[in-house]
Amino acid sequence: MVLFKRLIAILVFCSTISCSQFFLRSPGDPVLNRDSDPCYNISRENAQHPIIICERERSYTVQVVDKKFMFSKGEFQARFYDHLRNFLYRSAAPQKSLRGMSVDIWLAAPVFAPDAAEWVAVVSTDEGFLAFRLPLPLEHWTMNSANAVWLGSEDHPTLRAIRTDQVIITPQPGLSPANALKFIETSGVGARRDILGRPIVQRIVGDGSMIRLDTLALGAPQVARAISRSADARSHLMAVNYSTAGGRDSYQAKVFRFTLP
């Protein structure tokens, strides 16, 4: 009976989040540091499509089905630092220092397209976790609002990940589209600037029945708070939400960690 209850619990859990995430997720230290074998196969259930990562003293090696990639640890970490610094500088919440930030690197491969394996880099900031999906080759890396997601207090993977650059506003029923758009305009959010003097709201999209505010990266929380706290917000707005970040059923595991210098 106990075993049956455990199986039911697993099935219920798998109905809400990827089973492969459940079985392969390492909640503690990266899997490569847990035994003497320097290699780890994240797709062990799929013998036809091996996704294997190996960590050695100065390098990482990744095998994706029949392709192999090798990365210098020093170059990997240096490139990540430069990309993250530039991303944060361009965002609505630039940070003066990245020193001491912890970075967890996951290797993820979609179950139905394992050859599309990619990195998921999770950065621990003072306010929560920020994640980036990055292609395997370092020269193809870019960090922008399209591949950045905010995890908040939850670690990867989570179903609560949100985009950092969009706010979705639903007006109250009966409020005309013209009045809904007028309320947004008079709320003052369009005039908000970041510390570099740039407008945080880059674009307003929608016909009034649903309004989307596109912001600088990491600008969505500031805009959502400002809208929610503006005068008459409750009488004009039914909901203020973020755009959720879509996910895929993937084989994945946390494979290594480093700290930014």
Image (cartoon, rainbow, N blue to C red):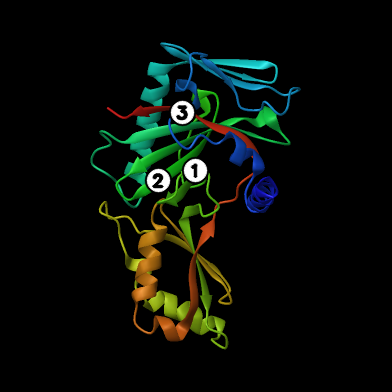
Q: Is residue 66 left or right of residue 23?
A: right
Asked whether 189 or 222 is in front, the reply is 222
Residue plotted at (46% across, 83% down)? 236
Task: Name the mark on residue 129.
Answer: 2
* Quarter of the image where the C terminus is located: top left
Provide residue 249's location: percent of width, then percent of height.
66, 42
Disc 1 target residue: 156
Q: Please, what is the three-letter code of the amino acid marked with disc 3? A: Pro
Q: Quadrant of residue 108?
A: top right
Q: Secondary structure at mark 1?
A: loop
Disc 3 target residue: 30
Q: Quadrant of residue 19?
A: top right
Provide residue 223's location: percent of width, then percent of height.
38, 64
Q: Is residue 150 left or right of residue 125?
A: right
Residue plotted at (68% across, 22% down)? 50
Q: Please, what is the three-letter code of the amino acid marked with disc 1? A: His
Q: Nearer the viewer, mark 2 or mark 3?
A: 3
